[in-house]
Image (tube, rainbow, N blue to C red):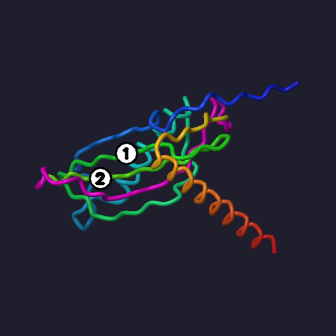
Amino acid sequence: MTEHPTTPPGKPTSYSRVTLSRIMTAVDVNLYGTVHGGVLMKFVDDVAGAAAARHSGGTAVTASIDEIVFSEPVRVGDLVHAHAQVNWTGNTSMEVGVKVVAERWDSAEDEPVRVATAYLVFVGVDVAGAPRPVRPVLPETPDDQRRYKEAEIRRAHRLAKRRAIQAHRAS
């Protein structure tokens, strides 16, 4: 008889929260003199991966970047903070939300500026690289509950899009 791994006990949303910070330098810029979007995308993936690994209690890999929105340019010298948390969990997958803010080097006393937001899907994997169960996330606040519900909507849209594309290809 094959034994199936059991789902670990749930953890509150706050358990998964991670913040990474770094100062952007001249090696991060694009031809327009602002920080390259790819640099920010890697930063987003790094912080989301840390949140997913923390929440799942082990290795978690990026399955998809559901959405990334760049709202303001980042400049050399800006101190950039990427905040991530697990918004939703399924059996083996998790949605991680990321907010990126910048403290402008030339106006450090001002409030940080939101420069990007993103939603990524991670899958917990075992040592062989096969999907493994991840613990449920337990929303704590009304904001966490809103994020959980919105993550379910994004998941439903991803699945519906996949089914529509597969149906189109089969016809």
Image side of residue 10 versus residue 110, left or right: right
The three-letter code of the residue at mark 1 reads: His
- What element does badge 1 sit on? strand
Magenta extent: 106-132
Above-or-below relation of 66 to 92 = below
Q: Position of residue 124 (x, y in %)?
A: 60, 37
The residue that mark 1 highlights is 83
Q: Which residue is mark 2?
A: 101
Task: State which quadrant residue 18 falls in.
Answer: top left
Residue 170 placement (x, y as % from top left):
80, 70
- Depth check: 81 or 17 in front? 17
Q: Residue at x 68, y 37 (%)?
A: 130
- x, y percent for residue 41: 40, 54
Name the N-terminal-most of marks 1 and 2.
1
The foreground one among 25 and 115 is: 115
Residue farthest to the right, as pictured: 1
- Answer with left or right where residue 111 lies relative to residue 37: left
Query: Disc 2 residue type?
Result: Val
State the separation of the CA atoms marked 1 and 2.
Answer: 8 Å
Left or right: 39, with 149 as reference point: left
Residue 21 magenta-drawn? no
Q: Are marks 1 and 2 in contact (CB under 8 Å)?
A: yes
Res. 162 image quadrant: bottom right
Position of residue 27 in the picture relative to residue 140 (left or right): left
